[in-house]
Image: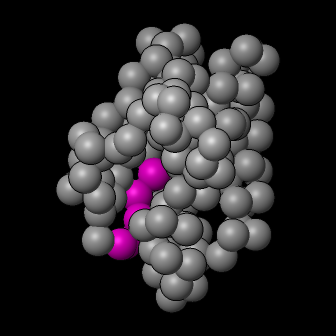
């Protein structure tokens, strides 16, 4: 009888073109079909992971198409995790401005990480801010 635990991660490399976010969307759809996660978690995963890929393309790799975004999926009996890593210089994830502060409410950007942290059950940055791991409990 096959185990529902995935033994090795599934990895994808995406060139840094904004239209390639749809590749990440297809990747998530395939994962949903394969691992049957429910609609509530699917919505959170879709928004949080595509936002992370978007950030990696725009902010991490600065839209340099010769740089890639690496997406990795790991599934266990308790959680689904996605790691998104860019080939940029990283950033100081501990000093992000609070998008809910009054002085930032009218700014057009700066809400992505805030949103990601509210959609995922756990968020962990690594590799000097070049990688983000999003965990969703199942």
Q: How many marks?
A: 0
Residue 116 in view of the camera: no
Q: Nearer the viewer, residue 132 or 34?
A: 132
Q: x, y percentage for residue 67? A: 47, 81
**Segment colored magenta:** 84-88
Position of residue 11 relative to residue 58, above or below, is above
- From this view, report whether residue 12 is shown above or below residue 81: below
Q: Nearer the viewer, residue 45 or 34?
A: 45
Q: Residue 115: image x %, image y %?
A: 57, 32
At x 52%, y 40%, the residue is 104
Q: Residue at x 29, y 58 (%)?
A: 91
Q: Residue at x 76, y 40 (%)?
A: 29
> Which part of the image, by quadrant, shows the N terminus?
top right
Asked whether 79 falls inside the magenta stretch, the response is: no
Nearer to the camera, 4 or 97: 97
The image quarter containing residue 41 is top right
Q: Residue at x 56, y 78 (%)?
A: 63
Judge whether 85 appears above or below 18 on screen: above
């Amino acid at each position: 009888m096959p185990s529902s635990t995935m033994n090795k991660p599934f990895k994808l490399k995406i060139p840094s073109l904004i239209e390639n976010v749809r590749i990440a969307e297809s990747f998530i759809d395939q994962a949903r079909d394969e691992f049957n996660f429910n609609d509530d978690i699917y919505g959170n995963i879709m928004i949080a992971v595509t936002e992370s890929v978007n950030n990696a393309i725009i902010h991490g790799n600065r839209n340099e198409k010769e740089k890639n975004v690496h997406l990795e999926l790991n599934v266990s009996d308790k959680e689904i995790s996605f790691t998104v890593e860019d080939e940029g210089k990283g950033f100081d994830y501990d000093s992000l401005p609070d998008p809910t502060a009054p002085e930032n409410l009218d700014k057009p950007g700066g809400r992505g990480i805030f949103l990601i942290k509210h959609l995922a059950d756990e968020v962990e940055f690594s590799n000097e801010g070049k990688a983000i791991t999003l965990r969703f409990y199942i």
